[in-house]
Each structure stands twice: as structure tokens, then as C-alpha cells.
Image: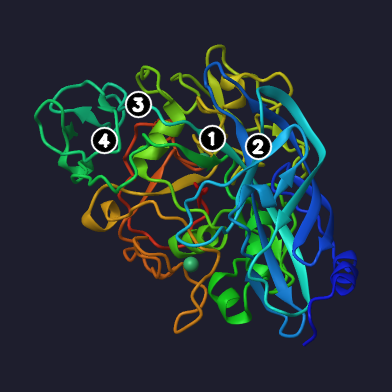
Amino acid sequence: MQKISPFFLALFLALIPFFLFGNNVQISNVSLTNDSTITFNISWENSWRVSVAPNNHDAVWLFLKRRDCASGQWSHVELSSTIANHSAASPLEIYIDGKDASGTKGLFVRRSADGTGNITNTVVSLRMTALPVGQYDFRVFGIEMVQIPQDSFLLGDGNISTGSFTDGNSSNPYYVTSEGPIAVSSAAGNIYTTSTSYRPVSMPATYPKGYAEVYCMKHEISQAQYVDFVNLLTSDQAASRQITGTANRLNITGTWPVLVANVPHRPMSFLGWSDFLAYLDWSALRPMTDLEYEKICRGPIIPVAGEFAWGTSLITDANTLTNDGTANEQSSNAITAGGGIANYNNNTILGPIRCGFAAKAATSRLTAGSTYYGVMDMSGNIWETVVSCRNAISVGFTGNVGDGVLSVSPGPGFANQPSWPSPLASVGSSSAAAGKAYRGGSWNEVAARLQISDRALAYSADGRRFNEYGGRGLR
Ligand SMILES: [Ca+2]
Ligand SMILES: [Ca+2]
């Protein structure tokens, strides 16, 4: 192998399509500006940073993969841990959260000051480190995220939803005011449910409870994102993770390493628990917990009885599509005043609709079906796969993030991060995924399952690939 040659690298880069549609994030004009710096343009729509409620911002999670031209294998790229070694043109800035166990596996770009609107072809340069001598192709991945600020919040909706959490044996919500331990009992000040079927176990300080700041994927994992992931694995890793077919609005054809997402903007379904965790590990993200799901939906405000992700108990079924199968796939249903819209109820649309389908120009939180913070489709479309708080293995989860690297042997292609529950769960087993849960309902569920305090299916250990299963990552 030769020493890294900028000329060679530039040549390879020019030969490979470097567009990524992570929903509406676009990365273009990727080039190598010296032997360790990748420069590209980034664009995405409807960016924001605000100092009024919800006091948050959006961002894009960036990470790089490199292909060794000799072996053909893709690897995760280490980035410099020094912010000053990277750059982002106005109005963006670089943010490194320091959550990696070692090194820097990725970083955020976000607005540096309050403002709203589209980000258009803004130049970003990232410094790579620990790059072995060799010749490489590079790919830049960008995932749209929403910042969820540190804040106290209430769990439960007044005991209306199935398994709604309460403060002791009352109908009052439970107030989460720190990441400190939470005890479970009927006494005031402890978390509780009237039915033992839905009661959690006590949670140590290390289990993420939703109080601390996180970044949450704005959309469910898309079919394009999943296909990009599988195509860059080794052949034996891909054999564990490959999902193809055309059932229930999935549309992935071909075989590794040229799988094709024919409806790239639609959410990925049929994700088994081990598929889901592997995607998150490879992306240097992590799963969300049951409690984090409710915080991300409700925010710090007072619960509404039976509320959905958009904060009211009124719901319109998205069951009439326009531009079906395109990047503008959306529903044309008139939304009930005071309510939101979601894909649910197994009616006409028998599968997921495009990620963020309800967000249009001038939509509100309600009519976009958005959470308090601006996260999309948390009620309906595809189930949100989360870490439960039901048993010891689930509350042993410490919120550590993936490192971009999956298992190689003996079982190739699995997540392998400490504390992640049941990462080896077989996609053929209905009971191997201990520690897993589902929140928020899906296209195939009744409205009650979409309520954000509902836990009717919050303790499933099903590891299988079903047409309603998917989710999103946190960082
Ligand atoms: Ca969902
Ligand atoms: Ca790993």
C-alpha cells in the first residue's frame, strides 16, 4: 500500500456519488482539502435555534466511514476531539458532546445563534485522526437531530392511559427532577402504577430518565438510512442485518452490497431488536429509554389526559395520500380543530408514511403531529423501540453511546456496547429481547396505543422483525 496521497483520494472521491438524503439533509461537494481534512457542503430545511419555549435547536449528527481501497472494507473514521480543528461556516458551529468512551466518533453542526430557516450549501470541514497509511474512499453521513434540553418533567397523564405512571398510589403524575435514583412503591414521592402488569422496577442513577440533555433523531430511521448501513458492512455482518421485501410499504430490493431503497424517505419497518441496536451502534448513537420517550413528547409542561405526541387528545387518521412513493409523500386529510394527525388504525395505508409526512410550510405543532420539542411521528407510523424500565437488565442500561463498530465474530454484525440489553437477541425469537419496549403505537394500532403515557406493549421481549417495528436513536 502507498502512503496517503491527496491526489489519489481526490480522484476516488470524484468517482463516487457523495449525496446523502438523511430525510432532507443533503451533503454534497465532498473533497479532501489535505491528507486529513474532509470538506463538504451541508443543507437542510427548517432549521431553528430559539431562546423562547421550547428553548432548543435542531442539529445534524455527522460521522464518517472510510473504505480501504486494498481490502474494500469500510471502517468508522476517528475525528479530532479539538473543536478548533474543525470548522463550519456561518450560521453554523461545531459541537462535540464528549459522550464517546474514547476518541470522537462524530459531532454535531448546529446554528451558533438564534435564528430559523433553511441551511443552504454551508461549508463544513472535519479533521480526521488516526488514519492508517493507505488509500481510501470516504462517505459522510448526516442525521437530523433535535436538542432536548435538560429539564424537569412529568410522567403520566392522570392515570388515563393504560399503565400510566403515577406519584405513589394516586392519579397524579410523577415529577422527574433529576437523574437521581427512582424508587417504586405506593408511597407518595415514589413512582407507581395501579396494575402490577405495567409497574417498573426501581431505577439507579445511571439509567437515563429524561432529565439530562440529549439529542433525538427528528425522524424515524428511514429505509435509505438502513440500506446505507447494511451496504457498508462486511458480507457476513450484512448477512445478519439484511432486510428486503415489498410488504406493508417497505420497498428494499437487491442484495448486499447494492441493496436499493426504492422509497428512501419512508421509515424503516421490520426492524428486529438486534437490527435496531446494530444500526444505532454503527451510527455512534444509542437507544432511548421509556422515560426519555415521554419527556421528548411532553416536554416540561402539564400533562393532558390521554394526550398524543402533539399535546392534545384529539387525533385525525392520515389515510389519504398524495404523491405516494415520492419525496413529497403526504396526507390530504383535514385535521380536526385542536387535534393532530398520525398514521394509525390499519386503515387504507397499510404501512408507514414518509418520515415527517405531516410537516408542511406553516404547519403548527398540532398539524405537523410534532412533539413539544419538534420531534416528528412519535405517535403512530412506526413503533418507537426503546429500553424499558421493567426489569433488571433494562435498568442496567447506562445510556452509553455506540462506537461505530459492530461485532466481527463469532456472531458478526451485532451491537457490542456495554450495558445495552440483549444485543444478540435472535430476530427469530419472540422472547429473547429482554429489556426492550415499544412506545407510541404504529400504523396498525388503535389510537390508545399512540397516547404518550400508554404502556400496553411497553414490556415486550419480542426480538422479531414485524411490519410495525422500527425506531430512532439518541445521542
Ligand atoms: Ca413513531
Ligand atoms: Ca460497537
Q: Nearer the viewer, residue 293 or 93?
A: 93
Label 1: which residue? 147
Query: Quick check: can you spot residue 319?
Result: yes
Query: Quick check: can you spot residue 321?
Result: no
Q: Earlier in the sequence, mark 2 or mark 3?
A: 2
Looking at the rendered structure, the number of numbered marks drawn on it comes to: 4
How many angstroms separate mark 2 from mark 3 (CA)? 24 Å
425 shown above or below 218: below
Cβ at disc 4 under 8 Å from ligand 1: no
What kind of residue is marked 1?
Gln
Q: Position of residue 440 (x, y in %)?
A: 44, 38
What kind of residue is marked 4?
Gly
Task: Choose top left, top right, bottom left or bottom right for residue 210.
Answer: top left
Q: Residue at x 52, y 21 (%)?
A: 54
Q: Earlier in the sequence, mark 4 or mark 1?
A: 1
How many angstroms separate mark 4 from mark 1 (CA)? 28 Å
- Locate the N terminus and report the quarter of the image it occupies: bottom right
Mark 1 lies on a secondary structure that is strand
> Which disc, if any, is residue 152?
3
